[in-house]
Amino acid sequence: MAGIGAFAFATGRIRWGYQCAALLTACRVDRDDAGGWTLHATVTEAHQLRIRQSGLTFEAVHARGVWTWPIDSIDLAAGACTARLSSRTG
């Protein structure tokens, strides 16, 4: 993806409300030329009911706190996660 920015995180999680829906490693968030965000990660654990709900968010810890992106769409296949994200909220 030819993007204008990217962030990498060793770990992350997908939340459904206050509950963990999935634990992730090797997380990368890319920003494309149109300003959209895409998450690519490896899934280490996933709760099969929670991960299929609406209202999911991706959460990544960084040096100064936590960044959170609402998830617009998500695809899980063979231990990999690709998700389309809305604008970062924190």
Image: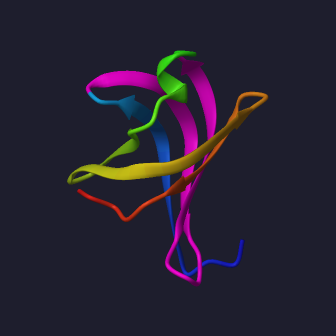
Look at the picture and state if 56 lies above or below 43: below
> Closest to the observer: 84 or 64?
84
Q: Quadrant of the N terminus?
A: bottom right
Residue 31 belongs to the span the image colors magenta:
yes
In the image, the segment drawn in magenta is: 18-46
Left or right, residue 48 beside residue 90:
right
Residue 80 on image: x %, y %: 70, 36
- Report the magenta stretch's main SS: strand
Left or right, residue 36 beside residue 80:
left
Look at the picture and state if 25 lies above or below 61: above
> Closest to the observer: 65 or 79?
79
Residue reaching furthest to the front: 54
Residue 90 location, quadrant = bottom left
Residue 40 on image: x %, y %: 62, 49
> Closest to the observer: 35 or 45?
35
Residue 6 on image: x %, y %: 53, 67
At a point 34% along the width and 61% down the height, the residue shown is: 88
At a point 49% along the width and 41% down the height, the residue shown is: 10
Residue 34 belongs to the span the image colors magenta:
yes
At a point 53% along the width and 32% down the height, the residue shown is: 24
Residue reaching furthest to the right: 78
Residue 18 on image: x %, y %: 26, 26
Q: How is the image coloured?
A: rainbow
Q: How many marks?
A: 0
At a point 47% along the width and 37% down the height, the residue shown is: 11
